[in-house]
Image (cartoon, rainbow, N blue to C red):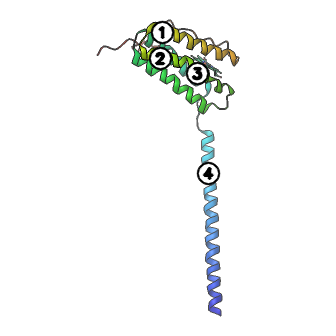
């Protein structure tokens, strides 16, 4: 009889031990999740204005690449703009304006076609359409003081916009 009681007590102690072990594991995991959550909350996320400044640079580079028939560079620059627009939708959800970036899609589609067709006059028209759409959004979100224009001088002197000589 005593042996049975000891066995039952032994099982009870082992079971309780395992439970409290589980509890402390859960506590440790909770603490880990909390600290990871804090890290995520405090991690750096670029704001809409920073993405726009990047887009501004690619917009200017795209123009000089296109008018100089540097189609590989033009293709690269338009993809940089497309990536930034995707990122805005992913990272700037706190800004309601972000949802409106999709309005650039028709202009981007036109530009992609002119780049693939390597057609400078069509490229210029599509670029004007893109720039007008940038400003349509700026007006729609009350940033009309922010007027984007067709650039007149290359944004950088340390990059070639013509087709490089091989
Ligand atoms: C969602 C609508 C929207 C579209 C489309 C849009 N913008 Fe903007 N843009 C904004 C908003 C909002 C701001 C102000 C961001 C801020 O709060 O800093 C801004 C700011 C800017 C700025 C000012 C940055 C600075 O610091 O001076 C430039 C330049 C700019 N946009 C260029 C462009 C260009 C070029 C395009 C088109 C290729 C474009 N934007 C398309 C909404 C838009």
Q: State which mark lies toward you, 2 or 4.
A: 2
Residue for point 50% across, 18% down: 58
**Disc 1 C-beta below 8 A from ligand 1:** no
Asked whether, in this view, residue 118 is left or right of residue 37, the answer is: left
Identify the image quadrant of residue 21. bottom right
Do residues under tags 4 and 1 come within 8 Å of each other at their CB atoms? no
Residue 67 position within the rendered picture, expressed as x and y whole percent measured from the top left: 44, 9
User: Disc 2 versus disc 4: distance between alpha carbons?
Assistant: 47 Å
User: Disc 1 versus disc 3: distance between alpha carbons?
Assistant: 25 Å
Do residues under tags 1 and 2 come within 8 Å of each other at their CB atoms? yes
Q: State which mark lies toward you, 3 or 2.
A: 2
Q: Earlier in the sequence, mark 2 or mark 4?
A: 4
* Nearer to me, 15 or 43: 15
Identify the image quadrant of residue 99. top right
Residue for point 63% across, 40% down: 41
- Provide the residue designation for mark 3: 52
Residue 50 position within the rendered picture, expressed as x and y whole percent measured from the top left: 58, 24
CA neighbours of label 2 inside 10 A, class few (<14), some (14 to 19), many (20+): some
């Amino acid at each position: 009889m005593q042996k049975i009681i000891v066995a039952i007590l032994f099982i009870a102690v082992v079971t309780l031990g395992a439970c409290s072990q589980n509890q402390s594991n859960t506590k440790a995991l909770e603490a880990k999740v909390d600290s990871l959550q804090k890290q995520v909350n405090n991690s750096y996320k670029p704001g809409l204005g920073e993405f726009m400044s990047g887009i501004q640079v690619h917009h200017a580079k795209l123009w000089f690449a296109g008018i100089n028939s540097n189609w590989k560079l033009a293709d690269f620059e338009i993809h940089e703009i497309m990536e930034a627009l995707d990122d805005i939708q992913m990272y700037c959800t706190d800004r309601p304006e972000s949802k409106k970036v999709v309005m650039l899609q028709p202009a981007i589609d036109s530009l992609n076609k002119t780049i693939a067709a390597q057609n400078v006059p069509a490229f210029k028209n599509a670029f004007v359409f893109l720039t007008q759409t940038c400003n349509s959004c700026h007006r729609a979100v009350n940033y009309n003081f922010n007027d984007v224009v067709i650039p007149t001088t290359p944004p950088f002197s340390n990059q070639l916009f013509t087709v490089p000589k091989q």
